[in-house]
Image: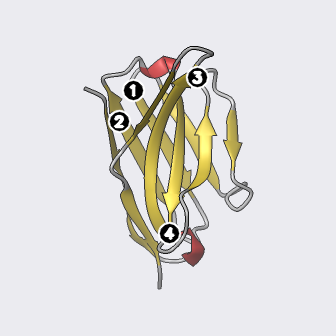
Amino acid sequence: QVQLVESGGGLVQPGGSLRLSCAASGIIFRAYAMGWYRQAPGKQRELVARITSGGTTNYADSVKGRFTISRDNAKNTVYLQMNSLKPEDTAVYYCNADRSSSTYKYDFWGQGTQVTVSS
């Protein structure tokens, strides 16, 4: 059974930092691209950051220079370091694992962790 378990969310003041973690089980972690998505109230879920199995990263323009995604294949864990947080970063953050080829596609989601940026 595949499980993605996020942790590290909470309430933080503007300008503060948080580090999210996502522990994966039930998959060959090193073979998956891992991503962080977020969904604010009344908005669609959007990609925040993604890291491929080979370590290539990409970020939403809104978080470039503030957020850093990383992975530890030995711990089956992906991280999102969030610095200089803004109120508009408030959302539920979801961990995603995906792997695909021409013949298959696997896509798994965590339950989400709330991040609230407010004074």
**Where does label 1 land, which residue?**
76
Sequence-first tag of 2 and 3: 2
Give the mark toward the camera: 4 or 3.
4
**Mark 1–mark 2 distance (CA, rounded to whole Å):** 6 Å
**Where does label 4 land, which residue?**
40
Give the mark toward the camera: 1 or 3.
3
Sequence-first tag of 1 and 2: 2
Along the line of sight, which residue is nearer the eye, 101 or 90?
101
| Disc 3 element | loop
Q: Amino acid at mark 1?
A: Asn
Name the residue at 68% across, 36% down: 57
| Disc 2 element | strand
Q: Amino acid at mark 2?
A: Ala
**Where does label 2 land, which residue?**
23
Image coordinates of residue 13 in percent, x first then y, are 48, 77
Circle 4 Cα neighbour tier, 10 Å, few/some/many (<14 / 14–19 / ≥20): some
**Where does label 3 land, which residue?**
53
| Disc 4 element | loop
**Mark 4–mark 1 distance (CA, rounded to whole Å):** 27 Å
Sequence-first tag of 1 and 3: 3
Sequence-first tag of 4 and 3: 4
C-beta proximity under 8 Å, tags 1 and 2:
yes
Sequence-first tag of 4 and 2: 2
**Mark 4–mark 3 distance (CA, rounded to whole Å):** 28 Å
Quadrant location of the N terminus?
top left
**Mark 1–mark 3 distance (CA, rounded to whole Å):** 12 Å
Give the mark toward the camera: 4 or 2.
4
